[in-house]
Amino acid sequence: MLVFLISSVAFGATCVMDSDCTTDQYCDEGACILFDGFVDACPPGETKIEGKCYEIEYECLSDLDCGLGEACSLDVCITDVNADSDNDGVPDVEDNCADVADATQVDLDRDGVGDSCDDDDDNDGVDDTADLCPRDADADQSDNDGDHIGDTCDDDDDGDGRADSDDNCPLDSNSDQADADADGLGDACDLCPYDAAPAHVDTDSDGIGNICDPDDDGDCVLDIDDNCPSMPNDDQSDINGDGRGDACDLGELDETLAVCELLDAIDSLDDEALTGCCDGSAGDPGVCEEATCLTTVCDTDPYCCDVEWDDICAEHALNAPEDCACSPLDFDYSDITYP
């Protein structure tokens, strides 16, 4: 190819490829050279080195080809320490919300993501849009008064117009703050509103505190007549006649028989003595005579009815006291030889 007269070499210009030069120049050995007419230039994407055209692999042609916080320099994307994509005055390399203006850089949960672009500011696993307390960790989202403000951040959990810090029943609405026994606990949440007491224990969970409940254990036997007032025992069984029911007695057959001696005595019974009792190990499958208990245990562990009623089956029965009332104290102790 004929080469026409080259005018001159651009003053101090440097280049890698022809595209680095002006339209009236081409790149030759790192210099942009002016030309007139046709020249022996390289095709787009190539550059001439020592008279030969070589393909150039480049990462970018402009900043648009680079990622956030980068700039194109000599066809390579480099970190632009001054880049500020959201124009909030904080460089992208330091910005915890590089795409969202966030000059304050507040990060409540310190997870490295600024609150302005964090979907869960308090990091409790509940998105801010659905969180009853978006600024206070509150995974259970409890809302006692149903006002759509979680209890964790609600100053008035029961919605009675009285701040929790000044409410004698913070979880029970009582705007009048009535306190008949003047014990500091409002009548609305006092288990014994007419009996002042430092503690409010409710053994049978019937909503009536023990101090004012005539039947603390809820076994339908009044405490004044109950030989185990804090433990349900409607049969009032007292095998050793010591005035203390078997349910709350340590198990003495009399005041001199130790607990370990009683256990030894029970162990001396043969399997036949245990037959029919759900919480004893009898050997034969399905030996329990209490139908409800039998169903309960075998539904849990079919082995007990299909193969053998063993110690594990007996333990299942003991763990289901509502359906399995039989216990060692229901045995016929006439067969026991006491130590």
Image (cartoon, rainbow, N blue to C red):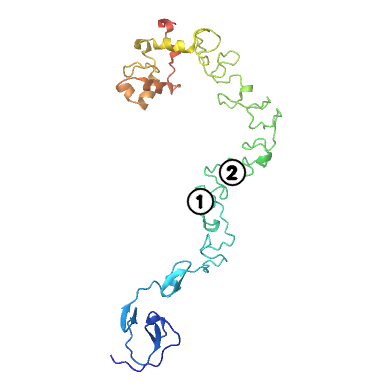
Residue 57 placed where, x, y %? 35, 73
Is 310 positioned to the left or the right of 10 in the image? left
Is 314 positioned to the left or the right of 233 in the image? left
Rate crowding at label 2 as few (under 14), some (14 to 19) or many (20 or more) other CA atoms within 10 Å.
Answer: some
Quadrant including the N terminus? bottom left
| Residue lying farthest to the bottom in this orientation | 5
**Residue type marked 1:** Asp
| Residue lying farthest to the left in this orientation | 1
Residue 186 placed where, x, y %? 67, 32
> Which label was assigned to residue 152?
2
- Residue matched to label 1: 127
Name the residue nearer the viewer: 204 or 91: 91
**Residue type marked 2:** Thr
Q: Establish if 294 lies above or below 54.
A: above
Quadrant including the C terminus? top left
Tell me the quarter of the picture where residue 197 sits: top right
Q: Establish if 29 lies above or below 196.
A: below
Residue 263 placed where, x, y %? 44, 13
Q: Residue at x 40, y 84 (%)?
A: 31
Q: Establish if 210 lies above or below 337.
A: below
Name the residue nearer the viewer: 89 or 304: 89
Describe the element under mark 1 as helix, strand or loop: loop
> Which label was assigned to residue 55?
none
Kindly report the distance in space between the C-alpha atoms of the residues bearing marks 2 and 1.
16 Å
Name the residue nearer the viewer: 312 or 29: 29
